[in-house]
């Protein structure tokens, strides 16, 4: 029996795990998993998902069939034919090169995932921006964290959560807004429960339209109307100003642009805000008082703010409160965006989005583009921002984008407005799907399937919500002929280099001179020199010896940095944080007489994303065995419906059938459907029926700054399914 230290592959808490292995008939297999007591994210704890990781790791035990060989589909949707890696690599490279030569570099796109490791992300980004010469690379992290990125950049100057997990222990008020932390980040929630035991005076405020398990435990629960977060935060600031609870000294020393915000919030009187948000003035006052007057206030937030057409404004309005009260840059305080996926942070660090470059450089900045071009040994990096997630699939539908390479994600289930996404995929001239699993809603559209390794087989790094970089280590061999994601990108990159007229400078023999992931990571590390996320003091060896570290950690530092902005200096031109006077806007798609319900989506405690792994574990299913639409007792009673009755849920984009669950947690005129089930789980026949799950209904309108879609709010009608 042997043990390997690694990191959980599910959420952005980034818990350390110890993988236990044993030999079985000459093969090493995973036999168990337990929390790593030395990892500072979890100190040995694991949640229900993490503690069943071993059940998903052995291919022989996996219910979901693994993709074992590269394959080519002569006719889409029909049984693919296995081919050699050489044929698969050449086919992809040749087809991409042909399309690029005929239609230009912007006719192809790569869609990657926050599940990828930092090294994977880096090489895909270089392949698209350095070799192909387009910025058409985006990620499913666009669907979860891009509004937090934009909010941080607008206000604090950098995409970086300034806090650390220890702040949960040290806060005196915790303001949880747009996050069901108990379900989505369970190990952090347990830390919060411990903090409450240790400090009976700790106040927990929860803001959420749905009375989640997190909200039920709050000292103060604000059940706001969907999408009214900006009005709430402006209303809290109005009260703070009136009561003189703001920190004038902090504002004048370390911030700019407060006057415009002060003018804007004059209209957000307690009376007006209580009407907009549907809460009482007393609770609003109490929230403002606890937030502003507490010795240390920590906000924790997630998709409730981000997945919105006003996501950037919501993030900025919340950061405003921290700046106005000086609740930032000190122990136990600050705006703490909880990352959804295990490596959404690492993807951003290497610039793996359509508008970013390596080491948080900006595509719009000519100097930054030149620095990256120099580092990569190419003549230039294109200036024009690429297609972000939603426009990328829309461009397939309008046939402006001809080819797409989808890596480690299942957009045919996870994107909003799925009918349009499926139309786009079916119109695409060429679709490559790089996957660990043989059957997803997206593999049905593949022309070429590339088998990838998955957790317990891979090596590399991930960054969690508190900027902590951890190693991911392999415990078992790759399944069948699966290759690592970075390796597939490298081999296709090298094949493409031979086919495309080079953007390479003389003296650059290849853009991909890597023998392994450590070489890629070292190149990424060098790209951070002198940047705000400088990690030049870090190496694989140091990560193994000193354990996971938070960035920045420049040369000469022995440990990473716990908190940012403790000196009040911000990474902006004037070194000050900036208030943003963002107006409150209603949801992108309003409810009306025809579509009177506000549909919300979210996670369940025991499932992860599209359930490729957690959906195959019986103990996890026990918590919630089938998809359903949650309705209030009032609405169910009005339609004479009881638990289990079927209803049509219809939006402007599609109609789906669900059983109902009557729940006191939902306000009247609202509905909730978990995000996890797609057509294969609903219909039992992968993709062969029109059922698409909740994303057949959701709204794809995006935030104009972040490009994040409004997955948290769609207008729907709900009618009993037995009506003619
Ligand atoms: Fe894994 Fe997140 Fe659970 Fe930790 S909290 S064990 S990272 S799913």
Image (cartoon, rainbow, N blue to C red):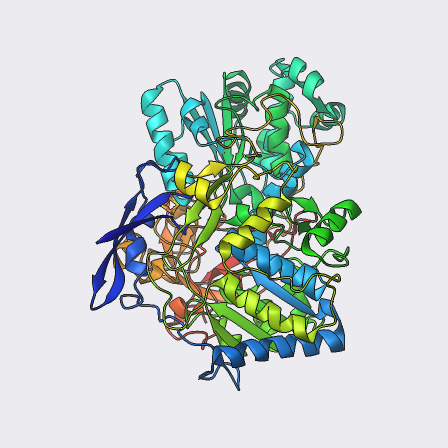
Which residue is located at x 58 percent, y 64 percent? 653
Where 603 sits versus 165, above or below?
below
Percent position of residue 322, x then y? 59, 25
Report the number of discs: 0
Q: How far across and down, in percent of the image, does residue 703 sit?
A: 66, 49
- Residue farthest toward the bottom in the current orientation of the protein: 74
One can see residue 401 in this view? yes
| Image: 642 above or below 469 | below
Q: Quadrant of the N terminus?
A: bottom left
Q: State which quadrant residue 684 falls in.
A: bottom left
Position of 122 with respect to 15 (left or right) is: right
**Is residue 642 positioned above or below 180 on the image?**
below
Which of these two is toward me, 8 or 270? 8
- Counting from the top left corner in percent of width and height, residue 633 is at 38, 47
Left or right for 339, reference 22:
right
Nearer to the camera, 591 or 309: 309
Residue 711 seen anywhere in this rendered image of the structure:
no
């Amino acid at each position: 029996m042997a043990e390997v230290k690694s990191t959980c592959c599910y959420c952005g808490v980034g818990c350390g795990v110890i993988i236990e292995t044993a030999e079985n008939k000459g093969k090493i297999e995973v036999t168990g998993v337990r929390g790593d007591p030395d990892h500072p994210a979890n100190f040995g704890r694991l949640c229900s998902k993490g503690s069943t990781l071993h059940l998903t790791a052995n291919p022989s035990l996996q219910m979901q069939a693994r993709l074992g060989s590269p394959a080519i589909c002569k006719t889409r949707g029909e049984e693919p034919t296995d081919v050699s890696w050489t044929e698969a690599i050449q086919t992809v490279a040749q087809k991409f090169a042909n399309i690029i030569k005929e239609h230009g570099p912007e006719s192809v796109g790569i869609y990657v995932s926050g599940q990828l490791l930092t090294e994977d992300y880096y090489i895909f980004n270089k392949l698209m921006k350095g070799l192909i010469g387009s910025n058409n690379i985006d990620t499913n992290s666009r669907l979860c964290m891009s509004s937090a990125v934009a909010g941080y950049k607008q206000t604090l100057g950098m995409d970086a959560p300034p806090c650390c997990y220890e702040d949960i222990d040290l806060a005196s008020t915790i303001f949880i807004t747009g996050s069901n932390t108990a379900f989505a980040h369970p190990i952090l929630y347990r830390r919060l429960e411990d903090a409450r035991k240790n400090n009976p005076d700790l106040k927990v405020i929860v803001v959420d339209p749905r009375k989640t398990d997190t909200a039920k435990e709050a000292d103060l629960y604000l059940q706001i109307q969907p999408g009214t977060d900006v009005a709430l935060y402006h209303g809290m600031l109005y009260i703070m100003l009136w009561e003189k609870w703001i920190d004038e000294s902090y504002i004048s020393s370390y911030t700019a642009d407060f006057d415009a915000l002060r003018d804007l919030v004059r209209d957000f009187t307690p009376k007006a805000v209580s009407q907009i948000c549907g809460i009482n003035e007393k609770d609003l006052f109490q929230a403002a008082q606890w937030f502003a007057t507490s010795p240390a206030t920590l906000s924790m937030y997630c998709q409730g703010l981000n997945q919105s057409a006003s996501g950037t404004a919501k993030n900025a309005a919340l950061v405003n409160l921290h700046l106005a009260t000086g609740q930032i840059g000190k122990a136990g305080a600050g705006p703490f965006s909880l990352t959804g996926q295990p490596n959404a942070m690492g993807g951003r660090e290497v610039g793996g989005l359509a508008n970013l470059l390596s080491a948080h450089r900006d595509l719009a900045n000519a100097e930054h583009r030149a620095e990256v071009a120099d580092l990569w040994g190419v003549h230039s990096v294109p200036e024009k921002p690429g297609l972000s997630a939603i426009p990328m699939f829309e461009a397939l539908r309008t046939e402006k984008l001809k080819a797409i390479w989808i890596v480690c994600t299942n957009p045919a289930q996870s994107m909003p407005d799925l009918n349009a996404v499926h139309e786009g995929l079916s119109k695409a001239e060429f679709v490559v799907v790089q996957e660990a699993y043989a059957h997803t809603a997206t593999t049905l559209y593949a022309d070429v399937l590339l088998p990838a390794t998955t957790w317990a087989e891979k090596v590399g790094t991930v960054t969690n919500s508190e900027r902590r970089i951890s190693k991911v280590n392999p415990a078992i061999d790759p399944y069948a002929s699966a290759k690592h994601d970075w390796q597939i990108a490298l081999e296709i990159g090298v094949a493409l280099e031979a086919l495309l007229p080079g953007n390479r400078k003389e003296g650059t023999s290849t853009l991909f001179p890597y023998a392994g992931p450590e070489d890629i990571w070292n190149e990424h590390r060098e790209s951070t020199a002198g940047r705000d996320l400088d990690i030049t003091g870090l190496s694989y060896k140091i990560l193994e010896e000193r354990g996971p570290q938070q960035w920045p950690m420049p040369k000469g530092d022995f440990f990473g940095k716990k908190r940012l902005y403790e000196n009040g200096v911000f990474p902006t031109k004037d070194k000050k944080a900036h208030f943003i006077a963002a107006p409150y806007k209603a949801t992108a798609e309003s409810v009306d007489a025809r579509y009177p319900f506000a549909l919300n989506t979210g996670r369940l405690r025991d499932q992860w994303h599209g359930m490729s792994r957690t959906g195959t574990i019986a103990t996890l299913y026990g918590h919630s065995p089938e998809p359903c639409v949650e309705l209030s007792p009032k609405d169910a009673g009005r339609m004479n419906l009881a638990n289990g009755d079927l209803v049509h849920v219809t939006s402007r984009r599609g109609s789906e059938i669900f059983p109902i669950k009557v729940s006191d947690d939902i306000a009247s005129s609202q509905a909730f459907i978990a995000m996890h089930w797609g057509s294969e789980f609903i219909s039992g026949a992968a993709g062969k029926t029109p059922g698409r799950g909740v994303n057949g209904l959701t709204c794809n309108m995006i935030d104009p700054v972040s490009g994040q879609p409004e997955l948290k709010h769609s207008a729907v009608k709900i009618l009993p399914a037995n009506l003619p």
